[in-house]
Image (cartoon, helix red, strand yellow):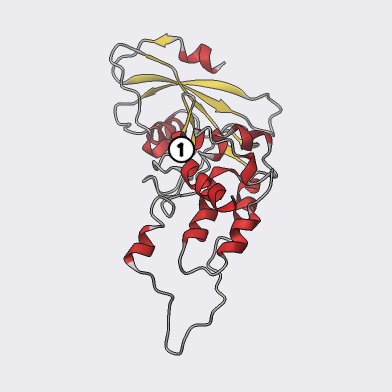
């Protein structure tokens, strides 16, 4: 379906563009389908603007998540023209000679609640499973208010703290598609390595060992879909290789 829609050119004028948006409402008894909207994109810069235009002027029933509009919250993660991305950071196609109809789908291989909203339950359960908070074995000294880091120690967290848990990388990973309940996926493994690399945490060995196993770190085959999909330009595959190296 996607290749057929992307391959058909739709001539446009005066900012008018064609958008095929995934629609599904479990309460109306209809099968999932693509619905076409012709939208005046003259005042739209990003794809999230287009979705607002559709909701405000064409169809108020369309449902999607959004919050910050600045690529910080990760709420508007979806699949646009076959690529996982954030709608607030994805520019509207401006092909002057006419464009293929832009296709907007929910994140792939996730249970759809309604339209572009997917069920993130497994994703957050897996995030919780790695205990993403600092754990220490030592007590603070008298008068000590926090555990400090050097600039060098802090720099080791770069490329990880920026992760916004949007799930674009997880839902681009075939291993996650087929093993969602058990394989944590690249986003969660990156977050796990962030805790491992944090000098303030005293449970490094335990955290590394907790990731050992065929259905955990061993399920990653390093095809790097995750790194290609990350809208923040992070490299989860590299961090997963670091964990594998620590496990030997």
In the image, farthest residue toward the front: 248
| Near-viewer residue (77 or 66) | 77
Please tell me whether mark 1 sits on a helix, a strand or a loop.
Answer: helix
Decide which of 19, 246 is in the foreground and name it.
246
Q: Residues within 10 Å of mark 1 (few under 14, many from 20)?
A: many
Q: Position of residue 209 (x, y in %)?
A: 64, 57
Q: Quadrant of the N terminus?
A: top right
Q: Position of residue 132 (x, y in %)?
A: 55, 60
Which residue is farthest bottom? 142
Q: Does 94 sit left or right of 4 as displayed? A: left
Q: Can you say whether 6 is above or below 206 in the image?
A: above
Residue 44 is left or right of residue 2, and the answer is left
Image location (x, y in percent) of residue 104:
49, 27
Q: Which residue is painted at 50% across and 49% down in the image?
A: 242
Residue marked by disc 1 = 227
Going by the image, does 99 lie left or right of 220? left
Residue 61 seen by the camera: no
Say which quarter of the image contains residue 233: top left
| Nearest to the observer: residue 199 or residue 69 | 199
x then y, percent, for residue 84: 48, 33
Asked where in the image residue 182 lies, by quadrant, the reply is top right
Q: Residue at x 49, y 83 (%)?
A: 140
The structure residue drawn at horizontal position 68% and vertical position 24%, both measured from the top left corner, is 31
């Amino acid at each position: 379906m996607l290749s057929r829609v992307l391959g058909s050119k739709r001539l446009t004028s005066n900012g008018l563009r064609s958008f095929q948006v995934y629609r599904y409402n479990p309460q109306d008894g209809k099968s999932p389908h693509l619905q076409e909207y012709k939208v005046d994109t003259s005042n739209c810069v990003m794809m999230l603007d287009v979705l607002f235009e559709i909701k405000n002027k064409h169809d108020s029933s369309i449902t999607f998540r959004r919050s910050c509009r600045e690529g910080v919250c990760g709420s508007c993660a979806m699949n646009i023209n076959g690529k996982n991305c954030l709608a607030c950071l994805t520019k509207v196609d401006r092909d002057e000679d006419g464009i293929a109809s832009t296709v907007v789908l929910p994140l792939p291989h996730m249970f759809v609640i309604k339209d572009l909203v997917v069920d993130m339950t497994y994703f957050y359960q897996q995030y919780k499973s790695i205990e993403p908070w600092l754990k220490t074995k030592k007590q603070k000294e008298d008068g000590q208010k926090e555990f400090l880091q050097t600039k060098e120690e802090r720099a080791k967290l770069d490329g990880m703290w920026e992760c916004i848990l949007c799930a674009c990388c997880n839902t681009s990973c075939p291993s996650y598609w087929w093993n969602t309940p058990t394989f944590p996926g690249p986003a969660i493994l990156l977050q796990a390595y962030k805790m491992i690399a944090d000098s303030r945490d005293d449970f490094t060995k335990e955290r590394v060992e907790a990731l050992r196993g065929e259905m955990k770190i061993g399920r990653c085959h390093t095809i790097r879909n995750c790194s290609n999909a990350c809208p923040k330009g992070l490299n989860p595959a590299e961090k997963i290789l670091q964990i594998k190296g620590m496990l030997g």
